[in-house]
Image (cartoon, rainbow, N blue to C red):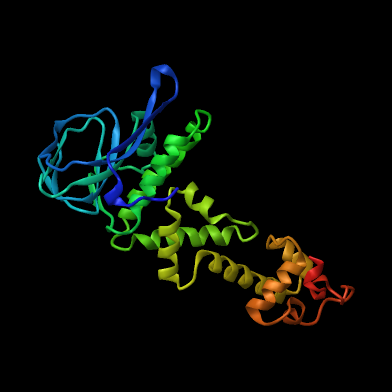
Amino acid sequence: MVFPGNDKIKDQLIFRSLGESSRRQRIGCGFMNKRGITFDEHNSLFTTYALIYVIRGQGTYVDEEGQETPLTAGSLFQRHPGMIHSTIIDPESGWQECFLDLGEDLYRALVTMRLVLPEEKVCWLPPGSGIEEEFYRMMISLKESTERELPHYSMSIMQFCASLLERARKGDEPEWVRIEQSCQDFNRRLDERLDLKEYCRDRGWGYESFRKDFTRKMGLSPGQYIIQRRMDEACRLLRTGHLSVKETAQKLGYRSPYEFSAQFRRFTGWSPRDYRGAQPSGEDQSSEEDQPLAAR
């Protein structure tokens, strides 16, 4: 799923519905170009919720009280159901946007959890941070989801919506929000073999933009960070002297003590047994970690 780039995306809109016939909930995602348009919405009142990210262009958001907020590339604005608003666009600014659209029940769930705030209308995320790529991936996944998958995918859409708003609330360094969250997740799951692309997909993140942001901020890739933290934990466990090398490898999710020992030696320059020092009496001194890698 390769993001074609903003200049190559034409109007693309995907809408899917789910739920009982009496409470059908619409989910939408897409990209729209609105060159030449002045009044996008004028004193409009919607029954669904929309979250719109401005890719380029200039305009103004007018809320129900007549308060005006400028819109520009990076603006993230909301259309809350039951609230009158207007959006005015400079027709010469080459306006392009991407959006999410959620039915009222899904919106109310987000409001109940205070993930969406009705009093919040316009916020901001920096242009060029890969958000369009994330929207694109959401749109394609929504299009390709089976009917069985759709209810589960709606949760990903809601999570993506909430994550965008939370990142926008963090100020001018939203990359750190994803990085800190991912670091906490990685530290909690050191015993797992994480598929980073799947991890990003589950959170509504563009993998390439996440990997680049993480590497630029941290000085090492997400995969390298996970290995580093796993080795940090290995050092702690080995120094306590309570676990054998084999038990340490198992606790950190390695398939075998040989794989663990090889990576530990590459990272620290020591074998796990030498690093740990004297072993408790009764432990086999010819530990598995000293066997050749060919035995893996």
Q: Residue at 68% of width from left, 63% of height from top?
A: 252
Please give left or right for residue 43 compared with residue 286 in the image.
Answer: left
Q: Position of residue 49 (x, y in %)?
A: 29, 34
149 w.r.t. 243: above or below: above
Q: Position of residue 139 (x, y in %)?
A: 39, 40
User: Camera-side residue: 136 or 40?
Assistant: 136
Q: Residue at 33% of width from left, 50% of height from top?
A: 132
| Quadrant of the image occupied by residue 271 | bottom right
Can residue 98 be seen at all in this image of the molecule? yes
* View extreme (top): residue: 22
Please give left or right for residue 14 compared with residue 38 in the image.
Answer: right
Q: Residue at 50% of width from left, 35% of height from top?
A: 152
244 w.r.t. 273: above or below: above
45 w.r.t. 198: above or below: above
Tally of numbered discs? 0
| Quadrant of the image occupied by residue 108 | top left
38 w.r.t. 5: above or below: above
Q: Residue at 46% of width from left, 38% of height from top?
A: 155
User: Camera-side residue: 33 or 240?
Assistant: 33
Can residue 65 be seen at all in this image of the molecule? no
* View extreme (front): residue: 8
- Locate the C terminus and report the quarter of the image it occupies: bottom right
Please give left or right for residue 285 compared with residue 123 in the image.
Answer: right
User: Camera-side residue: 212 or 122?
Assistant: 212
| Quadrant of the image occupied by residue 246 | bottom right
Q: Position of residue 20 (x, y in %)?
A: 44, 20
